[in-house]
Amino acid sequence: MIILFWILTAVFIAADRLTKAAAEANIAPGEIKRIITIGDRDIFYLSLHHNTGAAFSSFSGQTVALAVVTAVALIGITVYYHLQKEKKPFMTVCYAMVIGGGIGNLIDRVFLHQVTDFLNLFPFSFIFNVADICVVIGAILLVLYYLFTPEKPKAEGDSNG
């Protein structure tokens, strides 16, 4: 599972980097590229924005602090995953999504001092990117996994049960 984890992590990082590069190359700042429109409502569109903060532009201008916090969190999550005795494929994909997405945005923060966002989806008023999608979906699925996965049987010789 470790090899699968690192391959998927690399795939998620690559997807984020490639889509950000495509957005930078094909969308001018302030331009809106409509993808799905129903009537007068833009359901899904692309527009290029650079965010020096975290989610919802919180902590704007705190790029170094955000990069350090992100790096520490990513190291902690990666170590936690590797210490798991039983690594199931679903869990591996979820952890790879969180780590890959986190690394994707960390690369932006370290090298560009801002994160490139370009995806807009109605009814949300915030702009996001592929890394954000990976982190959010991976984290939600991990929470659900840990909440709803039945407890493992107690170890042999455990007298507390």
Image: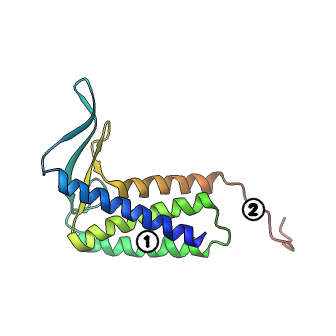
Q: Residue at x 62, y 53 (%)?
A: 147
Q: Residues within 10 Å of mark 2 (few under 14, many from 20)?
A: few
Q: Quadrant of residue 88?
A: bottom right
Residue assigned mark 1: 74
Does residue 19 appear to the left or right of 26 in the view shown?
right
Element type where label 1 sits in the image: helix
Q: What is the x, y in percent for residue 139?
A: 49, 57
Q: Quadrant of residue 53?
A: bottom left
The front one of 113 and 92 is 92
- Looking at the figure, which quarter contains the C terminus? bottom right
Q: Residue at x 21, y 69 (%)?
A: 112
Q: Residue at x 32, y 64 (%)?
A: 105
Q: What is the x, y in percent for residue 117?
A: 26, 54
CA gap, disc 2 to disc 1?
A: 27 Å
Residue assigned mark 2: 152
Q: What is the x, y in percent for residue 149?
A: 67, 54
Q: How is colour applied across the structure in the image?
A: rainbow
The front one of 106 and 156 is 106
Residue type at tag 1: Leu
Q: Residues within 10 Å of mark 1 (few under 14, many from 20)?
A: some
Element type where label 2 sits in the image: loop
The front one of 37 and 156 is 37
